[in-house]
Image (cartoon, grey):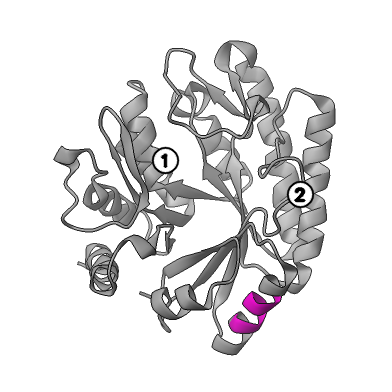
Amino acid sequence: MIRFMIGQHSNFSHEKQVRDFKNSFFGVEACLFKRESDIRELINAARKHKFNIGVHFPLRSGVWRLRDPQFLSKDKKIKSSSYEYIKKEIDFLKDVKPKYILFHYPKPVILDELVDWKNWRFADKTEYYFQSEYSFEEFQIKSEEFFKWIELMGIKNNFIPVLELDALNRYIYDSNLLETLLEKYSGIKLCLDIGRLHLQDKLDKNFNALEITRRFAKYAEIIHLWNIKVNDNVESNHFPVLPNLSPQDGWADVEAYLKIINEENKTCKILFEHRSELITDEELECCYNWVNSLLNG
């Protein structure tokens, strides 16, 4: 379980740390803390107990107009402001010394007009474009500009830039653009989010989540592991992965995802990005043990 991580969202919860974190775990991924006193507690705990910190950007909430920087925006002011926002927050993180900083990519996302995205969460309309509004050439140019810049920021500030794949478009799954960029800017790694992949697999008939996992697992630094039930409705968002949650009932086939990931990548970290309060202590232990057995069986 030395590759396992837990998440701390909004604040540093001592109760969650005691219940969810094990001494053998790699570290904690922190996101959207509301108070700087909680950030200090996280730093102190990491130093005392010798675990790593990852940052799910941003660590501080309320600094910019939205949570996620829109570095691919067609609006020059929003794009420039996004880069400044990232730089400001990276400067703030110097005392935190994060092992990695994770950003959602692409942002804004590029959506296929033929897919019903009502179950995808967006803060406002500037968080997405439809594919007809955004050419492949522009996507390629702006993506490479960001990759080049964020890799350099990682080198200068001693962190691994990690891009969590958000809603994916044809420019990614019908071309080799992303693989080309990841090979060229090899300091950048990916985050595969199992819940997001499963949800898009159910919404988008042109999207094959297991195929995407096979293509990109080797580039992954982090796997965000949680489950979601998708049938006519979407239920149980960020539910812990458990062996009794059947794909026939609409749950993600976690075993299939982890089998592929394990074949392609033996070193990526597993972040349990779940609502652990939804299950008992015994079920949480079952969750950890089951995932561990799938990765080491």
Is 182 situated above or below 94? above
**SS for callout 2:** helix
* Extreme residue in the bottom direction: 48
Is 115 situated above or below 181? above
Please name the amino acid that badge 2 sits on.
Ile
Q: Name the residue under label 2.
A: 86
Residue 103: percent from left, percent from top: 62, 48
Describe residue 93's horizontal placement relative to residue 222 as left or right.
right
Q: Identify the residue at horizontal 83%, vertical 35% (top origin).
A: 80
Residue 91: mark in rendering: none
Is 72 situated above or below 276? above
Q: Name the residue under label 1.
A: 196
Residue 61: percent from left, percent from top: 70, 54
Residues shaded magenta:
40-45
Q: Which of 293 and 240 is in front in this view?
A: 240
Q: Identify the residue at horizontal 29%, vertical 64% (top origin).
A: 279
Cα distance, mark 1 to mark 2?
24 Å
Instruction: Judge the density around disc 2: few (<14), some (14-19), many (≥20) Cα neighbours within 10 Å.
Output: many
